[in-house]
Image (cartoon, rainbow, N blue to C red):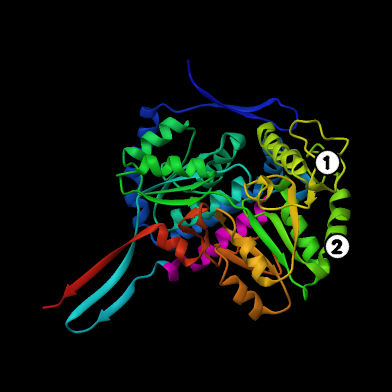
Amino acid sequence: MTKTLKCISPIDGSVYAERPVLTLDEATAKVARAKAAQKAWGERPIEERIALVQAGVARVGEMNDEIVTELAWQMGRPTRYGGEFGGFNERASHMADIAIESLKAIIVEESDGFERRIEREPHGVILVIAPWNYPYMTAINTVAPALIAGNAVLLKHATQTLLVGERMVEAFVEAGVPEDIFQNVFLDHETTSALIAAKNFGFVNFTGSVGGGVAMEKAAAGTFTSLGLELGGKDPGYVMEDADLDGAVDTLIDAAMFNSGQCCCGIERIYVTASLYDAFVEKAVAIVSAYKLGNPLDAETTLGPMAAKRFADEVRGQISEALEAGARAHIETFAEDDGGTYLSPQILTNVNHNMRVMRDESFGPVVGIMKVNSDEEAIELMNDSEFGLTASLWTADPARAAKIGAQIDTGTIFMNRADYLDPGLCWTGCKNTGRGGALSVIGYHNLTRPKSYHLKKA
């Protein structure tokens, strides 16, 4: 019997999409076609590759009205927010703009005696394994620069967002990218691991859980395949006494709750200086209490269902354990909370780091808020995590933010903003958040390999 992947819609529990998985032989054949086509693609002028990628991005934009509704059905984001094309286009456009400069040769010497330079060569075939929570934006982080750099790309999307890979490939091929250069693949875990273990890829980029990252490393063990891994976060916010209180509350709570809290760089724990603590909590509770939980297809809905019941159950479990250990819940259960994917948002106080809700990744609409009395205390708490993706610092003093930021083990430091990916900067993390870096010039360096030329002239 053919194995299939099923997208179960969080809206009503129906099967929204179903696709058969490729056998190992079928998947290997796709890799072979990509390898055969890649050399000619890499030899095309870079300006041509850039133009084709930009045309593919524009074609995705033309599909946006349909995509927004599809995303609501697949992973529950309210249609009122208009999808992901803004960020999708911003990231791809920036990588197109910096491509020529980022990929140009580094000239060490050009003299009568020697020519010495370092070129950037494409890896060949790249596998992109993308997550469901921001399925277009996370995928384009690697797809656009990988294609521009001359690689062929196979895109494997999460089962929860089964249609996204099809949409992206359809758009790019319609725009002129050769069909063997950018392919969508439906794979199960076993076939994915087997393909990696067989040295089919020059680079694998995975965004997902820590367990998934461990599986990638195990599959690649001994193959010397380069890996990029972004595996999650427990991102903190710290509000200092000179912060813009209203701005801090609005931004940090939105960063904790938007997309039903299903953001890898969303805020999951907040530390507030004692003098602002009570006012911060009061304002935060007012904001969250006004949310409208409901069907994401309804224009009035501001908080949709979580993508799957098992994700909601994890959040409910963390909240329940915290309450049993003495935490205080500030949000009454919403009438629309069905015990399944539709989950009430929650703000918790009287929390501490013995509670899973302040330690484990929640990936849902819950945030714990703690009072702190000094920068030193806040730094210690922010670093008390197995993850390190971003940290959001709220102060009017950039020098203070930079000093504190230097002491935090994380990939990105924000001052007076949160939950944003700047394509001009390297998107990276440390500790159990993973390794590697996407976007920026560093993203191009990770999607290519250096090749040195030492030419002694006669």
Residue 282 in the figure: left or right of residue 434: right
* Residue assigned mark 2: 278
Instruction: Note whether residue 70 is visible.
Output: no
Q: Verify whether residue 93 appears in magenta.
A: yes
* Residue 341: quadrant of the picture: top right
The amino acid type of the residue labelled 1 equals: Leu
* Residue 364: quadrant of the picture: top right
Task: Please tell me whether mark 2 sits on a helix, a strand or a loop.
Answer: helix
Q: Examine the rendered structure and indicate whether residue 326 appears above or below residue 195.
A: below
* Residue assigned mark 1: 293
Q: Which residues are magenta?
A: 84-102
Tell me where residue 408 appears, x and y as whole percent. Answer: 57, 66
Residue at left offset 75%, top offset 28%: 12
Q: Which mark is residue 444?
A: none
Q: Residues within 10 Å of mark 2 (few under 14, many from 20)?
A: few
The amino acid type of the residue labelled 2 equals: Asp
Q: In the image, which is nearer the foreground, mark 2 or mark 1? A: 2
| 389 vs 446, nearest the viewer | 389
Q: Verify whether residue 26 appears in magenta.
A: no
Residue 157 in the figure: left or right of residue 260: left
Residue 20 in the figure: left or right of residue 325: left
State the CA–CA distance, disc 2 to disc 1: 26 Å
